Image (cartoon, helix red, strand yellow):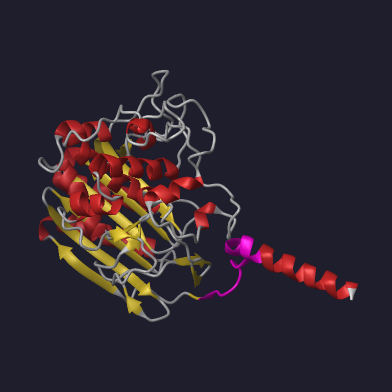
């Protein structure tokens, strides 16, 4: 009898371990041969004024797609217009559903850049000031020296994803559905800060979860209503919303892991713990619409645009290590055939089964967005985005 009790206990422990570590435990199972995705292509915008830049960029997409990507979607905007949008591959491999330019993907941390636009709208409306303390809007928050600016620039000291007493054990792969932003705060708000606010930089999507709670209080609406009313609908971002698992939202891609010519569906997650920092789905076309609205006069003030895209200094006066602003990074790109450095404001995102990149080039009124429905360990999208930017800058100047 004791022997069976031991066997039963071991079986229970093995089963519990499987569910606790399911994303890692299940990784090696269920792989299938990745089909040729080149035979499916959809083009929505093709402005002949930029024929040379588009032709070159399409050749770069051809090369990049050969790396093994279920679907790759790209859009470019110049001035007021989207001049090129194209997608290759499958939104759903198993059902043989081709992706199109209206197919929505997880955009991961590009969500932070989208959230920053709502922050900018509230700044322009006088509903908040980035120097305000979080406790002005959330009086019960235990740290009374954290500001809105520190949340939006990752200088607050709030931790990032960790392991938890949950199934699975990794917060990044959370399956828990949170009914509200306030409920999702329970994950981390009582945890100690990593450092005194403003003294260091530590990237954390939970900064934006707390920021979204502040935005709710400042706007007196839910975070979803704020994003819909202030960003998605005014900019006609019709394929952009939150990554609701129970949504009837159509034309949403499936998400995949890819290795050595094989694919499998990604682990199922619930992103309600991080809507603002990593829980939005969108298309390159919608992201380019947003980017163009920021580069042009009218949607937000020039002063506010400069504030949200200027890298934040720490308390010691030094710019933080990632040149991070408020939901954006700022970099200088160098090109062999362009004499001057090109200023690029950008944010990348990795999500479970998806990777995204959004780049704004203010001096040329240029916006580029790229998304693919596969996870990656490194971040290869800059290798595609940089030559596309170079081609368009050369044609614009």
Q: Nearer the viewer, residue 302 or 78?
A: 302
Q: Is residue 377 visible?
A: yes
Q: Nearer the viewer, residue 330 or 289?
A: 289
**Residue 19 covered by magenta stretch:** yes
Total marks placed: 0
Across and down, in percent, residue 47 comes to: 12, 60
Quadrant of the image for the N terminus? bottom right
Residue at 20% over, 45% down: 393
Whether residue 358 sits left or right of residue 95 in the image: it is left
| Quadrant housing residue 75 | bottom left
Whether residue 123 sits left or right of residue 353 in the image: it is left
Give the farthest residue toward the bottom. Answer: 95
Quadrant of the image for the C terminus? top left
In the rendered image, the vertical position of residue 142 relative to residue 215, given as above or below? above
Q: Which residues are magenta?
A: 18-32
Residue at 43% over, 45% down: 205
Give the farthest residue toward the right. Answer: 2
Q: Nearer the viewer, residue 70 or 7?
A: 7
Residue at 37% over, 69% down: 246
Q: Is residue 336 visible?
A: no
């Amino acid at each position: 009898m004791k022997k069976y009790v031991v066997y039963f206990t071991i079986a229970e422990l093995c089963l519990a371990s499987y569910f606790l570590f399911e994303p890692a435990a299940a990784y090696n199972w269920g792989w299938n041969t990745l089909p040729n995705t080149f035979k499916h292509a959809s083009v929505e915008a093709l402005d002949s004024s930029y024929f040379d830049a588009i032709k070159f960029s399409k050749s770069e997409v051809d090369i990049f797609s050969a790396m093994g990507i279920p679907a790759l979607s790209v859009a470019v905007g110049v001035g007021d217009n989207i001049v090129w949008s194209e997608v290759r591959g499958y939104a759903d491999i198993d059902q043989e559903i081709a992706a199109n330019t209206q197919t929505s993907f997880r955009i991961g941390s590009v969500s932070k850049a989208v959230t920053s636009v709502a922050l900018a709208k509230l700044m322009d409306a006088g509903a908040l000031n980035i120097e305000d303390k979080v406790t002005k809007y959330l009086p019960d928050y235990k740290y009374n020296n954290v500001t809105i600016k520190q949340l939006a620039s990752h200088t607050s000291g709030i931790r990032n994803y960790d392991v938890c007493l949950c199934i699975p054990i990794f917060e990044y792969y959370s399956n828990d559905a949170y009914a509200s932003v306030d409920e999702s705060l329970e994950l981390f708000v009582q945890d100690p800060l990593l450092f005194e606010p403003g003294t260091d930089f530590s990237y954390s999507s939970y900064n934006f979860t707390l920021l979204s709670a502040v935005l709710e209080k400042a706007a007196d609406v839910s975070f979803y209503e704020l994003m819909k009313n202030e960003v998605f609908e005014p900019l006609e971002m019709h394929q952009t919303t939150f990554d609701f698992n129970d949504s009837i939202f159509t034309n949403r891609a499936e998400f995949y892991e890819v290795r050595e010519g094989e694919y499998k569906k990604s682990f199922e997650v619930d992103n309600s713990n991080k809507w603002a920092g990593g829980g939005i789905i969108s298309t390159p076309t919608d992201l380019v619409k947003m980017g163009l609205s920021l580069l042009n006069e009218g949607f937000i003030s020039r002063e506010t645009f400069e504030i949200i895209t200027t890298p934040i200094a720490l308390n010691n006066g030094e710019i933080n290590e990632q040149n991070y602003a408020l939901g954006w990074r700022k970099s200088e790109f160098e090109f062999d055939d362009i004499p001057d450095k090109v200023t690029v404001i950008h944010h990348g995102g990795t999500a479970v089964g998806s990777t995204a990149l959004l780049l704004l080039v203010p001096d040329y009124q240029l916006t580029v967005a790229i998304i693919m429905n596969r996870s990656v360990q490194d971040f290869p999208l800059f290798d595609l985005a940089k030559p596309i930017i170079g081609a368009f800058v050369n044609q614009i100047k």
